[in-house]
Amino acid sequence: MIPLKITNHDARRLWLSTNGLGKTPMGPLDLMALIRRLGFVQIDTIRNVTRAHHHILWSRNQNYREHMLWPKLKTDRTIFEHFTHDASLIPMEFLPMWQRQFRRLGDKAARHEWYQSGLAQQQIRDIHERIRAEGPLSTHAFDTKHTGPREMWARPPHKKALDQMWYAGRLATSHRENFTKFYDLGERVFPTPSDETSIGDQQQIDRLCKTAHDRLGTATPGEIQRFWGATDAAEVKDWIVGQSDLIPVEMENADQSLTLALATPDIETRLANAPAPTSRLRIINPFDPLIRDRARLLRLFGFDYRNEMFVPANKRIWGYYVYPLLERDRFVGRMEIKADRAAGRMQVTGFWPEPGTKWGKARFDRLDQELHRFARLAGINHLGWDCRRT
């Protein structure tokens, strides 16, 4: 089959639309439909202005507010928390295809030196039984201490044991309070499997690949594999061989090179229906799914971005928590923002226009409007600049 040629302009338009960032982010909010469409929402502890999960959802519908998410985990049980490429919230209906990820990550954690807690098996069973008897508990309910070097990721033995059981699905996140995770028995958080929901490993691979490909629209095998991080490269390649309806496409990249990829069967309909990207200037979170796959980001948009939070300060190119700035279908700059929510203040501490991008009054006006909208999400009234607007 002759590959369908997709221009770079159309590839960007399609990816923004597929990712929920093509239209102006207003209108009625169906939060679960939004999460299902994304597939998962990465969560993160850092609250620079607002935490990543809130920003990601707000970016797609600015009627979203911070109080709306956690009841879906704690009360409704329509989402569960587990590990894709990082800690994420996943629709509960995806649980049947997630059993292999419990097994894969549970086995990996059991073997990995980092998770060797130093606790005897009976002590680990005691932790499990205490949760069974007392209900959801956080790591603060246990008192083992870390010994040895105080490294960034050092954890006490009970925390390692809790996380190993959490990766394996024996424990699950019951809820979070002020972002502190509470562990409960998996059987009390996850619905009881039935004949309809229990599926074999190969069916799980099929669902993982199909749901990933559907949320990417067009993708290379590596991009499909990286979406969930729950399959390996060989499994994805075997899955592709068994799919007769995938459409080969030739994607034009930002540098005018071409990449061969596979598209969903409805690719031409998707291209026809994808809207021209909104002119509203958008502040994108560093953990947003639009930019998570850095190779895909560079290929499609020519935007070279890295997260420098864990880079030593003297080796950072930009800053600690830097937001890409998206306008229509291109990135026009990046900025560092810091907030003091208690004081009701948000400050722009760094601003870097993309090379070749002119920043006149109209573009700065659009940025200021988005900054004020972003500040209101966090309940902040005062906005200031601690750097030059150049």
Image (spheres, rainbow, N blue to C red):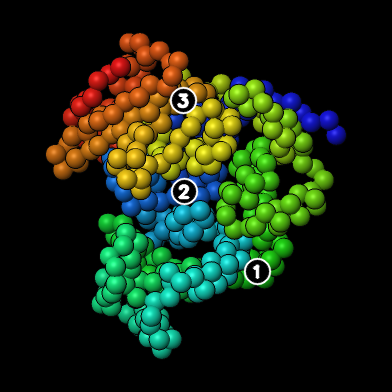
The tag earlier along the polypeptide, 1 or 3, is: 1
Do labels 2 and 1 touch, CB within 8 Å? Answer: no
Asked whether residue 184 is in view, the answer is: no
Return the disc, 3 or 2, that comes first in the chain's sequence. 2
Question: In the rendered view, would you say 16 is above or below 144?
Answer: above
Q: Nearer the viewer, residue 262 or 37?
A: 262
Give the labeled residue for mark 3: 331
Residue 300, horizontal then vertical, whole percent? 58, 30
Query: Dot 2: few (<14), some (14–19), or many (≥20) neighbours within 10 Å?
Result: many
Are the residues flagged by discs 1 and 3 in contact, CB closer than 8 Å? no
Q: Is residue 351 above or below residue 263?
A: above
Secondary element under disc 3, as helix, strand or loop, is strand
Structural crowding at the residue carrying mark 3, measured as other residues with C-alpha within 10 Å and reported as few (<14), some (14–19) or many (≥20): many
Q: Position of residue 12 (x, y in %)?
A: 58, 27
Q: Amino acid at mark 1?
A: Ser
Residue at point 25%, 20% (across, down) = 388
**Would you name the residue on which mark 2 appears?**
41
Query: Is there CB contact under 8 Å for labels 3 and 2?
Result: no
Q: Give the mark nearest the N terminus, 2 or 1.
A: 2
Q: Secondary structure at mark 1?
A: loop
The CA distance from mark 3 to mark 2 is 22 Å
The label on residue 54 is none
253 and 106: which is toward the camera = 253
At x 62%, y 44%, the residue is: 223
Residue 162 placed where, x, y %? 39, 73
Q: Residue at x 51, y 53 (%)?
A: 85
Residue with the most extreme bottom position:
122
How far from the left and from the top, in percent, is residue 107? 55, 72
- CA gap between label 2 and label 1 equals 24 Å
